[in-house]
Amino acid sequence: MRELRLRRALTLEDLHELIRQESGFEISQPTLTRIEREKRSVYDFEVVALARALRADARWLLGMIDELPEALDAPPPLP
């Protein structure tokens, strides 16, 4: 997740705001940090929110596919 967030030139604050806008709920910056560091599990609804905010395939975030589909490889709108 961190790799893609940095590729998109997003800060944790940007990602937090995109998740709030796209999904209507909050994932705090400390929680995002713990997720990135693999110190916290991710719930199914959080995977969906992260995929929407990062414009990524949820399967890629879950490690089920190796390549991010090109159609999704576009930066999200900044808040």
Image (cartoon, grey):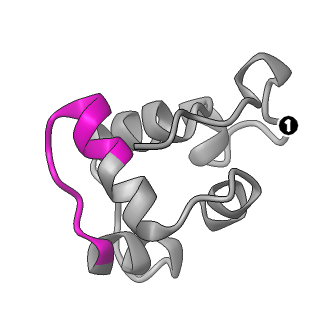
Residue at 69% of width from left, 63% of height from top?
Answer: 6
Question: Does the magenta run of residues contain 24?
Answer: yes
- Figure quadrant of residue 16: bottom left
Q: Amino acid at mark 1?
A: Glu
Residue at 41% of width from left, 83% of height from top?
Answer: 39
Residue at 67% of width from left, 48% of height from top?
Answer: 63
Screen quadrant of the N terminus: bottom right
Tell me where the magenta segment starts and ends, as one range: 18-29
Q: Residue furthest front?
A: 79
Query: 41 or 2: nearer the eye?
Result: 2
- Residue 24 lies left or right of residue 41; in this view the side is left
Where in the figure is residue 9, as x and y percent of width and height?
Answer: 68, 58
SS of the residue at dot 1?
Answer: loop
- Figure quadrant of residue 3: bottom right
Q: Which residue is mark 1?
A: 67
Label 1: few (<14), some (14–19) or many (≥20) C-alpha neighbours in 10 Å:
few
- Residue 65 lies left or right of residue 53; in this view the side is right
Residue at 39% of width from left, 43% of height from top?
Answer: 79
